Amino acid sequence: MTYKVKKRQRDRARELRSNMTEAEKKLWTALRRQQLGVKFRRQVAVGPYIVDFLSYEAKLVIELDGGQHANAVEYDEKRNRFIEAAGFEVMRFWNNDALENLEGVLQMITKKIGKTEKPPLLTSPRKRGEGRAKPPPRAITVTHAHSTSETVTLTYGDRFLRRKLLTSDSGEEFIVDLPETVSLNTGDAFKLDDGRLIGVLPALENLLEITGPDLTRLAWHIGNRHTPCQIEPDRLLIQHDHVMHDMLAKLGANLAEVTEAFTPEGGAYGHGRTHGHAH
């Protein structure tokens, strides 16, 4: 397939590179300079479309979607078919995935590329003149524990990880370095290499509470949008999303903003998660 890239597309791509979203900037810091073993380019024209990130070497396109894509399924499918016909595989992630769960996103991209290198730990470089500090303890396994003397409080997004530098609720840094990505909930604990356990607690988050006379119907529509949902007998809880809010209001749901821990129902596939377009 051949398609001549027009000047207005090149200009548009240049404009997009100069005005990247926060999610794009965060993912680009981990993709640039071959950090995952292959070279990625940003805002590249593929036929009539401009994709967010592209690796010619891996034949891979990575797209970040905002809430508006929930209403653009037909367009996305047409776009995907063209890109795939051009010889690329497409991975799609929500903006929130890149902003709140970058390690999990990098894990899935690395697996797709087929490289064995571990994604980089997102740590700050040591400033000039600082001595070499003792490395933080490492957590290489996760176990179950009813109670622990130390805890770490994490949001739903942060509880999906493989490698990351975390800070416990008492202020101690430790490195999570697990063999595969895991989804954590209350009752799970990181086992440090010095034998200590750090229990996992869900953080309070701003959520949308959904009630109404037909929760089963509302839950179906939420699931159809691949949105993580906490299911209870008399209510549903999801993370804030204005597109979902408007859709549910039109369906007759009663909506209220609440601040609670978020422990949604796990997906039938993957790591106990309900994933977006990437799956």
Image (cartoon, helix red, strand yellow):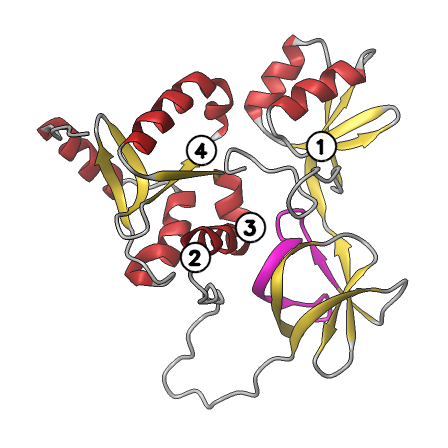
Marks 1, 2: nearer the viewer: 2
> Upstream in the sequence, badge 4 or badge 1?
4
Looking at numbered disc 2 in the image, what kind of residue is underneath it? Gly
Pointer 4 local density, CA inside 10 Å: few below 14, some 14–19, many at least 20: many
Position in image of residue 9 (x %, y %): 17, 29
Chain part drawn in magenta: 152-172
Q: Nearer the viewer, residue 140 or 186?
A: 140
Q: Nearer the viewer, residue 185 or 242?
A: 185
Position in image of residue 133 (x %, y %): 53, 87
> Upstream in the sequence, badge 3 or badge 4?
4
Which quadrant: the N terminus?
top left
* Image disc number at residue 229: 1
Q: Residue at label 2?
A: 114
Q: Would you place residue 203 above or below residue 237 in this image? A: below
Pointer 1 local density, CA inside 10 Å: few below 14, some 14–19, many at least 20: many
Q: Residue at label 4?
A: 65
Position in image of residue 79 (x %, y %): 34, 25
> Upstream in the sequence, badge 4 or badge 2?
4
